[in-house]
Amino acid sequence: MSDPAVELKLEVKQASKEVKESENVAEKYSAMTVSKNSEITMGELSSAASAMPTHKPVKKQIQFVEDKQEFSRFPTKAGRRSLSRSISQSSTDSCGSASYTDSSDDETSPRDKTQVNSRGSSDFCVKSIKQAEFGRREIEIAEQDMSALISLRKRAQSEKPLAGAKIVGCTHITAQTAVLIETLMALGAQCRWTACNIYSTQNEVASALSEKGVAVFAWKGESEDDFWWCIDRCVNTEGWQPNMILDDGGDLTHWMYKKYPNVFKKIRGIVEESVTGVHRLYQLSKAGKLCVPAMNVNDSVTKQKFDNLYCCRESILDGLKRTTDVMFGGKQVAVCGYGEVGKGCCAALKALGSVVCITEIDPICALQACMDGFRVVQLNEVIRQVDIIVTCTGNKNVVTRDQLDRMKNGSIVCNMGHSNTEIDVASLRTSELTWERVRSQVDHVIWPDGKRVILLAEGRLLNLSCSTVPTFVLSITATTQALALIELYNAPEGRYKQDVYLLPKKMDEYVASLHLTTFDAHLTELSDDQAKYLGLNKNGPYKPNYYRY
């Protein structure tokens, strides 16, 4: 019986001999150097090719003497981690010495870290303060497409209209939000900030703000407990009491109202930008419990007609593509809600060839959908056929467990509304269903029969959780928010009572005019005679408050 180890040595020896012969032929090729005007003849190529060694294929398979080997075929868990870090490092070497993610402490909760910025302050809690440099670059990129907000900053910073304002904010923490926060600071305000969504925070941006002195408490991937802890840290701090609130969703307002009623009563104004948050404010007002004036930015023209519509029209496709790589052509899509967000989503999906149907409770919105060429249905009528469901209503339980049970294998379910209540995700967290993480913000929910439904961002806001949003549109919203804060903070006593108000029409028009410069747009001016005929001031406002754009 032959020794496998001896056979292995013979195979290696034979392979070495073949390599030498190949090297000799390579030398012969290199010797065939020619000048510019000479050519290699076909004969030379033929003779060179014939000199190449030919070997019969070796049929014998190399075998190992024992199962015990000096190396492992598969890297250990530690080896995989080290290999991953090596690859990550090499991929960033050409761009810089640091990386967006510091893998050495990714598994440590920011709440368990002690971090200090270059100013010596530790009044913040972010993923890693080391990412501040990258965050600053992100903010600088955003500033380039937010020229109107920067223009407002330059015009008003000498007057410091927010001097003395102590603003506590709860919004998405992105590069665009950072430009807003730094504008508020340039106008004289002090700011403390937290995130309104546990998945939308850009860690490097949060770090950059913390480095600049903003007390930021947020990181991507917070738990529910972390979320409320961060809000509390923003509100409850020694020697600092907020007098203004900028909210997105109403969670900060709700927390302060419930936990710190004495602090809440001293607030001079609330600015709210989401359907969900505005709904909560109107509930408080109706019950007679709203003890401060509030500005409903969500229903301002510049927020609703631009951010809600144009932002969602572009970001819905981005979010779905990044998470699922889905092709939209021919897909059956149900969009729940045909408000401005729904209109934007439907326009984008239809443009790429999806077959879109709408669910609506409002006959006016339903009629708009019909006139735009969409079928208006009840979700139960199409639940077994649809490939994708997109919710954008601001309501709760728009997609129920019973409907999810009846969806076909491979269907995608996502939400474009602010709150995570539109899809009944809680009903999917049962022992009979299996959750399988596919990639970041993408889960397979597996039924006992093997059916899989793809759930994105665990039912939270798709675009800001899974992708990004157009900077220019957010500039419009951010400018509106800044003006609303200035208006409420500087308003004389008695102008605004303890109720919910819309932004004055004149301010909406001012925000729009600031952004027209980007397009080199030139407005037509009314003559005195025309202004008199229409009963308008030549400088606006040009539409009455009841006008529907």
Image: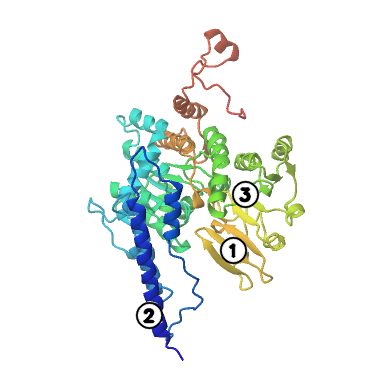
Q: Amino acid at mark 1?
A: His
Residue 517 appears at what percent x and percent y?
A: 44, 24
3D distance between C-alphas at marks 2 and 1: 50 Å
Q: What residue is disc 3 on?
A: 327
Q: Earlier in the sequence, mark 2 or mark 3?
A: 2
Q: Amino acid at mark 3?
A: Met
* Res 514 quadrant in image: top left
Q: What residue is disc 2 on?
A: 9
Q: In the rendering, which numbered label is found on residue 444?
A: 1
Q: Is residue 336 above or below residue 68?
A: above
Secondary structure, mark 3, is loop
Nearer to me, 51 or 406: 51
Outermost residue on the bottom side: it is: 1
Nearer to me, 252 or 202: 202
Q: Is residue 37 above or below residue 520?
A: below
Asked if residue 100 can be seen in this view, the reply is no
Asked if residue 441 can be seen in this view, the reply is yes
Outermost residue on the right side: it is: 381
